[in-house]
Amino acid sequence: MEGSEAALFSSKQTVEDLSREMGSMGMDVSGSIQDNKLSVRSISKPSPGETPEALFGALAAEIDCLPRSCGLVIIDGITDLAIFCQDRTIMGFFSIFQKLCTAGKAIVVVAESSAFAPDLLSRLRQLCDTHISMMVRDRQVRVLNAVKVNNLEQRRDNGFSFRVEPGVGITIVPMFQVRV
């Protein structure tokens, strides 16, 4: 929205889906998409004869080829691929991101923690500069917790609860309203 270039790799959203959702929150991104300030690309699902490892490699190569001016990369949804990959493939994928972040890109990867074995998740957390986890308390209330920020593990509760409301966007839920 500020004019910087960004790329979204999504396993679920199309350009039209993103435009509609952002528009419902009062953020029109259609101009950014038309001006190539925001690119939306699909994350492929494995087809017969194609391995998740090959798709991870292709995705990493595509991200590596983004122009330097693209400072933010969001990868929304690697869960389906990560479930079937070997640990070394996933570690290699995240290692490439570490190199790109050192060169100035900010990369956000969204995945369900259940896609990774606990020991792999721990190693991934060590690779990443920041680790944020999100839980769903009930159908509407979500809790976001910063586990690691700027390479520092957080020792206390650093979370907040929020709700996503159609036509409004995100609203913070005071802790006394949260039912567990």
Image (tube, rainbow, N blue to C red):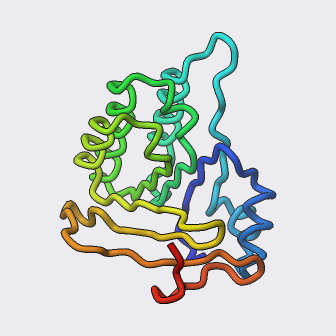
Residue drawn at (44%, 53%) of the image: 68
Q: Point out the image quarter for the N terminus.
A: bottom right
Residue drawn at (77%, 81%) of the image: 167
Name which quarter of the figure residue 31 lies in: bottom right
Residue drawn at (58%, 35%) of the image: 80
Q: Is residue 9 positioned above or below 173 on the image? A: above
Could you say which is closer to the camera, residue 14 or residue 64?
Answer: 14
Q: Position of residue 73 (x, y in %)?
A: 49, 54
Q: Is residue 165 positioned above or below 152 on the image? A: below
* Total numbered labels: 0
Could you say which is closer to the camera, residue 91 or residue 72?
Answer: 91
Q: Position of residue 78 (x, y in %)?
A: 53, 40
In the shown orientation, is residue 15 left or right of residue 173? right
Q: Please, which residue is most extreme toward the top here?
A: 49
Name which quarter of the figure residue 20 lies in: bottom right
Q: Position of residue 105 (x, y in %)?
A: 39, 56
Could you say which is closer to the camera, residue 134 or residue 124?
Answer: 134
In the shown orientation, is residue 11 left or right of residue 84? right
Residue drawn at (33%, 31%) of the image: 92
Name which quarter of the figure residue 3 lies in: bottom right
Q: Where is residue 45 in the image (x, y as percent from the top left)?
A: 66, 30
Q: Is residue 2 positioned above or below 41 on the image? A: below
